Image (cartoon, rainbow, N blue to C red):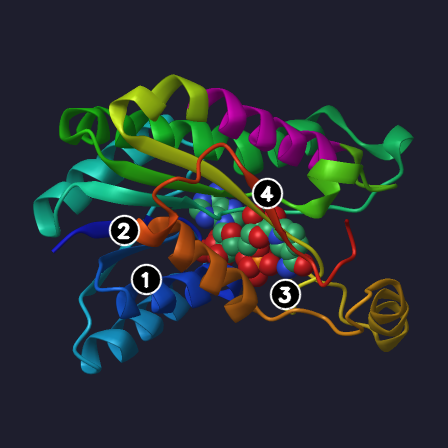
């Protein structure tokens, strides 16, 4: 059974991706950092339905923790053949209020975290001449968000990383793509009614997306049906960015 790792898989979009990849027949390594209990609950629920999942707690910003996590996954499941870099964090601040630490923190989780995981995943994928890496970016990495300069920069960096790595590892049979969500109902979205109503007005399809909308695309990109797709940035945004 092939293994898929979903970073930040305990809640939000990551949890929906973990479910979708179970249905695709993968053993799923559910990574979490702070949401350990939620990840354990998700894993127990999926395992009770006959799927194979395990929780691996690790802060993706720490290269040492990530290295250990990959060793644990290989020992307890099998080496990672699908990597979904979903862990992320956002912050809204005027540019002049962004501190050095804010900037570092946002880049660390959204960009360096993906780098750390890819570095550990690639040697096995290269040996196998097969693998799929899916990075969860954001429409704000494509078009820029006011008051989210560091988040937009990190996600734009992730898009650049995706395109460059896709070219480098395509000869090794490895595909690298970006999924770029718009407004999706999770804890990351501002929850007040005024913001939600304003967002809906800006979305051509007229509603906020669900984590499953993103997970469906990730499952497709992980599958053989997407075998000729690499280096792409595919939006799931209800038409908000066209
Ligand atoms: P949530 O805030 O619901 O979830 C964030 C996830 O990231 C959690 O599972 C969290 O795990 C994980 N995470 C954060 N920091 C770390 C870390 N250091 N190590 C490991 N895991 C970490 O947000 P979403 O589910 O909405 O976001 C998922 C991805 O989608 C993110 O990359 C986000 O930027 C992107 N996105 C979301 C949009 C939206 O509208 N919701 C729009 C565009 C992009 P834990 O709780 O265990 O720490």
Q: Nearer the viewer, residue 198 or 88?
A: 198
Q: Is-magenta flag for residue 145?
A: no
**Quadrant housing residue 47:** bottom left
- Kindly check if marks 2 and 1 are in contact, taking CB atoms under 8 A apart as contact: yes
Give the residue at x 20% y 72%: 51
* Mark whose residue sits in front, 4 or 3: 4
User: Which SS class for mark 2?
Assistant: strand
**What is the spatial separation of the Cα atoms under label 2 and label 4, in whole angstroms?**
18 Å
User: Left or right: where does residue 19 sit relative to residue 217?
Assistant: left
Residue segment shown in magenta: 150-165
Question: Could you tell which of marks 4 and 3 lies nearer the N-terminus?
Answer: 4
The Cα–Cα distance between marks 4 and 1, rounded to whole angstroms, is: 19 Å
Question: Which is more N-terminal, label 3 or label 2?
Answer: 2
- Which residue is located at x 28 percent, y 79 percent? 45
Q: Which residue is mark 1?
A: 21
On the image, numbered disc 2 is attached to which residue? 4
Q: Which residue is mark 3?
A: 187
Q: Quadrant of the N terminus?
A: bottom left
The Cα–Cα distance between marks 4 and 3, rounded to whole angstroms, is 16 Å
Considering the numbered disc 4 on the image, is that residue within a helix, a strand or a loop?
loop
For label 2, the crowd category at 10 Å Cα-Cα, with few meaning under 14, some 14 to 19 and many 20 or more, is many
Counting from the top left corner in percent of width and height, residue 87 is at: 49, 47
Q: How many numbered badges does the structure rendering display?
A: 4
Q: Residues within 10 Å of mark 4 (few under 14, many from 20)?
A: many
Mark 3 and ligand 1: say if the CB distance to the nearest ligand atom is below 8 Å: yes
Residue corresponding to mark 4? 137
Disc 4 vs disc 3: Cβ atoms closer than 8 Å?
no
């Amino acid at each position: 059974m092939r293994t898929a790792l979903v970073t930040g898989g305990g809640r939000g979009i990551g949890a929906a991706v973990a479910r979708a990849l179970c249905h695709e027949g993968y053993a799923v390594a559910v990574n979490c950092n702070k949401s350990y209990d939620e990840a354990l609950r998700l894993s127990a629920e999926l395992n009770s339905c006959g799927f194979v999942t395990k929780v691996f707690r690790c802060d993706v910003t720490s290269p040492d923790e990530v290295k250990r996590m990959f060793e644990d996954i290989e020992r307890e499941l099998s080496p990672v053949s699908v990597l979904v870099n979903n862990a992320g964090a956002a912050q809204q601040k005027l540019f002049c209020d962004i501190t050095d630490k804010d900037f570092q923190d946002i880049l660390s989780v959204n960009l360096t975290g993906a780098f750390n995981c890819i570095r550990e995943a690639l040697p096995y994928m290269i040996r196998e001449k097969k693998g799929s890496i899916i990075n969860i970016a954001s429409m704000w990495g494509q078009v820029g968000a006011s008051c989210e300069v560091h988040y937009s920069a990190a996600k734009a960096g992730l898009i650049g990383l995706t395109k460059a790595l896709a070219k480098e590892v395509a000869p090794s049979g490895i595909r690298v793509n970006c999924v770029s969500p718009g407004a999706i109902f999770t804890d990351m979205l501002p929850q007040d009614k005024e913001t939600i109503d304003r967002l809906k007005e800006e979305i051509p399809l007229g509603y906020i997306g669900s984590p499953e909308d993103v997970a469906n695309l990730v499952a497709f990109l992980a599958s053989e049906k997407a075998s000729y797709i690499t280096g792409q940035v595919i939006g799931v945004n209800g038409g908000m960015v066209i």
